Image (cartoon, rainbow, N blue to C red):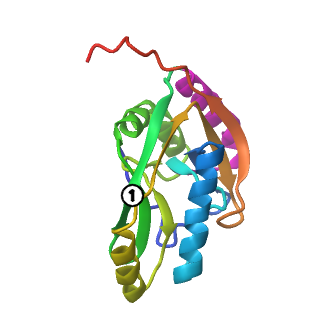
Amino acid sequence: MVMANYNGSGEPGDGMYRYQLVALPKAELKGALAEELRMFSHSYHGDRETDPEPCVVVSEFMAREEMEETIIRYLQRITGEQESFDITFNNYSGTPMHTVYIRILDHRPFQALAAQLQPIDGYVRSNDCPPVKFMLQPNIPISKKLSGRAYEQAIAEYARRDFHGSFEVTELMLVRDGTGYGNSIRRAVLRLQPARTGLSSN
């Protein structure tokens, strides 16, 4: 799997848009996550480069608009063969010395999905776009770009706090952001197959 930065600034190149494949938490949990983001911002005034609608980013890539239709067809074919899965949030952690995030317990579904999404990586690379960034250990950041002092204060507080919640991912959404973080446009809803419980060989 490729984990890559696009350039020093992380911004789209000429003629390219940033796309993200995301999972959106369901109603009540989405509200609880949004409240966590608001509370953190109020307390620490961090630079929260976080989408106003809390989401779990599965992958991110750059592509030109004329590639979008083909990418969506690829995604529909891939996700149409994937089973739904659960995401469980459990407490907080951080990336020293700048980010505090809500943890996701089991990363295996994202790693399996990344393997199936390799044709997208091949397609964008073949069109002179940077490699896809697969989020193999995703989380939900509640703040980014904290100062070192603010990070130390925040992680000390949040290490003692609890947060729990889960939801079933039955669909993924492709969003496009070409004008700045937080101005994403929904481009496609990609439904997953219902999970086949009780049929696992494990």
Callout count:
1
78 relative to 64 in the view: left or right: left
Query: Helix, strand, or loop for circle 1?
Result: strand
| Residue found 41% across the figure and 39% down from its top | 110
| Residue found 40% across the figure and 35% down from its top | 109
Q: Quadrant of the C terminus?
A: top left
Amino acid tagged 1? Asn
Could you say where residue 174 lies in the image, as x and y percent from the top left? 64, 42
Q: Is residue 92 above or below residue 201?
A: below
Could you say where residue 85 lies in the image, as x and y percent from the top left? 47, 31
Q: Name the chief secondary structure element in magenta.
A: helix
Q: Residues within 10 Å of mark 1 (few under 14, many from 20)?
A: some
Could you say where residue 30 lies in the image, as x and y percent from the top left? 61, 51
Check disc 1 and report the residue beneath it: 91
Q: Is residue 56 visible?
A: yes
Q: Is residue 193 above or below residue 135?
A: above
Displayed quadrant of residue 69 = top right
Is residue 69 covered in magenta? yes
Looking at the rendering, the stretch of residues picked out in magenta corresponds to: 61-80
Could you say where residue 126 lies in the image, as x and y percent from the top left? 51, 41
> Which of 189 and 91 lies nearest the eye of the viewer?
91
| Residue found 48% across the figure and 20% down from its top | 195
Displayed quadrant of residue 169 = top right
Residue placed farthest to the bottom in the image? 149
| Residue found 39% across the figure and 66% down from its top | 161
Is residue 106 covered in magenta? no
Q: Quadrant of the N terminus?
A: top left
